Image (cartoon, rainbow, N blue to C red):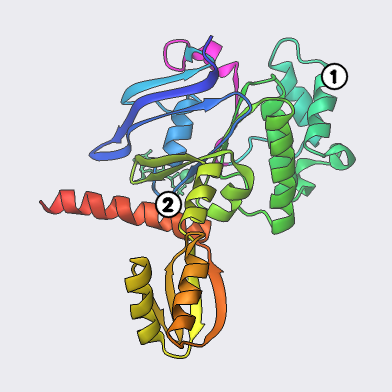
Amino acid sequence: MASFVLKVRNLTKIYGERKAVDNISFEVFQGEIFGFLGPNGAGKTTTLKIITGLAKPTSGLVEVCGYNVVRKFEKAVNNIGGIIENPELYSYMSGIDNLKYYASLYNGITRAKIKEVIELVGMQSRIKDKVKTYSLGMRQRVGIAQALLHSPRLLVLDEPTNGLDPEGIQEMRGFLKKLAHEQKISIIISSHILSEMEQLCDTIAIIDNGKIIEVKSLQEIKQTAEKSQKISIRVDYPNYAGKIIMSKLNVEVQIAGNSIIFPLQDENIPKATSALIAKGISIYGVTTLTKSLEEVFMEIIEKHRNRSASVAIF
Ligand SMILES: Nc1ncnc2c1ncn2[C@@H]1O[C@H](COP(=O)(O)OP(=O)(O)OP(=O)(O)O)[C@@H](O)[C@H]1O
Ligand SMILES: [Mg+2]
């Protein structure tokens, strides 16, 4: 059996003349939280709609637990729970009645299961209240509880933190991680906010203009950020100091105010400082500069955009 829960191959969706999704491929493993990160109009919702069977692909393949979502729709959707755009809840009914009603549409959902999903999303205290009295965060929680009732192996969430306050986002992060890491449910989640994704996801795919331009584990992204660390040394004669470093270490040096900045490798620090001191330069401070994940991401996107722009020009 395949070890991944979701497999997407060469997926394309064309609306009229526009390629909303352009030949994307990726997979999501059991218990993995897979983030789909991209700006407005990137193709996130379209992809998630196709995965949940709400839209048909123009070409390409989507398999959930080995079932093709087009040809084996029912078997595939039995393994999927999802919220695309807003949770579908009846506002005049209580949260628990919504869940009971939804459960009645399926075979074999027990009372114990209903209780379990309510606890999973932390809605015990308000579940008997009417949905119309809920905050946005509470609605999202009940929506997710509902999506989990038929014990899917894949949870699909399209920007579920939209409109939530920081506390609400943090709570949602907590229970999504629990679902993935304890219950081994795979989660595919979209967002255009990097900081949210980096705190939640195991893997992030960057999508721009219908194309996936990078799929990386969070660990790899952090390693890239660490590798691109720089060292900054504040001195009395930066131009002179810069020349000394360039000739001694054979690295590129930038000058910013009274500081010289160059790539950090461990042996550089003692080499650089002793070379400067030997030439009579005074050192006022040594700092290491680490790239933020934001900068690493922006670089990936910029690089890709420049590449496709040059293709378009030539
Ligand atoms: N039903 C549709 N008919 C025509 N074009 C569509 C349709 N749905 C989406 N599109 C187009 O497909 C592209 C991708 O849209 P999509 O909604 O997937 O983006 P998104 O990444 O979810 O953006 P957002 O962050 O704004 O939610 C956009 O250019 C959009 O205008
Ligand atoms: Mg969208």
- Mark 1 lies on residue: 111
**Residue 90 seen in the current view:** no
Callout 1, which amino acid?
A: Arg
Q: Is residue 100 left or right of residue 33?
A: right
Where is residue 242 drawn, in percent x and y? 37, 79
In the displayed orientation, state which residue is furthest to the left: 314
Q: Quadrant of residue 142?
A: top right
Where is residue 82 drawn, in percent x and y? 59, 30
User: How many numbered discs, if any?
Assistant: 2
Is 72 contained in the magenta span?
yes
- Ligand 1 has an atom within 8 Å of the beta carbon of the residue at disc 2: yes
Q: Secondary structure at mark 2?
A: loop
Q: Earlier in the sequence, mark 2 or mark 1?
A: 2
Give 178 or 254, whichever is nearer the viewer: 254
Where is residue 212 drawn, in percent x and y? 37, 39
- Mark 2 lies on residue: 40
Magenta residues, start to end: 68-85
